[in-house]
Amino acid sequence: MPAAQLADGSRFVGCASASAVTIRSMSPSRSTIQGEQIDLSTWALELQEERERVAEVNERRAASRGFLVFATDPERAPDEEGYRKVYATEARTAGEATAKIRPLAEGRRLRTYLATGVYKDELADAQWVP
């Protein structure tokens, strides 16, 4: 993980992955003054609390994610009106999202993507399915 030393002596550790929640100060003790001895047990406790917080946030996020489901009609030409319909829903997995949409899009081919991916701009025009 990349780390940066700040002017106040604290270190910021960050990650650009999808699982990163936020960038937090990871200084050995937020209450120590520069030049004092680091209390390693306090620092270890702070790190454990931070890990637990991140795990909770990630668990909540994974419990329900936004998906876009593209339903295309194989009997129509791609440039024809009504060829593609876009649905938006929340589900734990892509399979669950597809299962929600299948009854609404009989006879259509379904493709499911996370709403935060390449197709996130389609979300504004998608039909919401609870």
Image (cartoon, grey):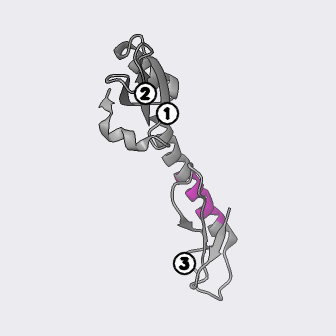
Q: Nearer the viewer, mark 1 or mark 2?
A: 2
Q: Is residue 40 magenta?
A: no
In the image, what residue type sits under mark 3?
Ser
Q: CA distance from mark 3 to mark 1?
A: 44 Å
Q: Earlier in the sequence, mark 3 or mark 1?
A: 3
Q: Quadrant of the N terminus?
A: bottom right
Q: Position of residue 92 (x, y in %)?
A: 48, 30
In the image, what residue type sits under mark 2?
Phe
Q: Secondary structure at mark 3?
A: loop
- Span shown in magenta: 44-53
Q: Is residue 44 left or right of residue 95?
A: right
Q: Is residue 48 magenta?
A: yes
Q: Nearer the viewer, mark 2 or mark 3?
A: 2
Q: Identify residue for label 1.
A: 113
Asked if the residue under mark 2 is in contact with the one under mark 1, i.e. CB atoms within 8 Å, the reply is yes
Asked if the residue under mark 3 is in contact with the one under mark 2, i.e. CB atoms within 8 Å, the reply is no
Q: Identify the disc placed on residue 70.
A: 2
Q: Identify residue for label 3.
A: 31
Badge 2 crowding class, 10 Å Cα cut-off, few under 14, some 14 to 19, many 20 or more, is: many
Q: Position of residue 70 (x, y in %)?
A: 43, 27
In the image, what residue type sits under mark 1?
Tyr
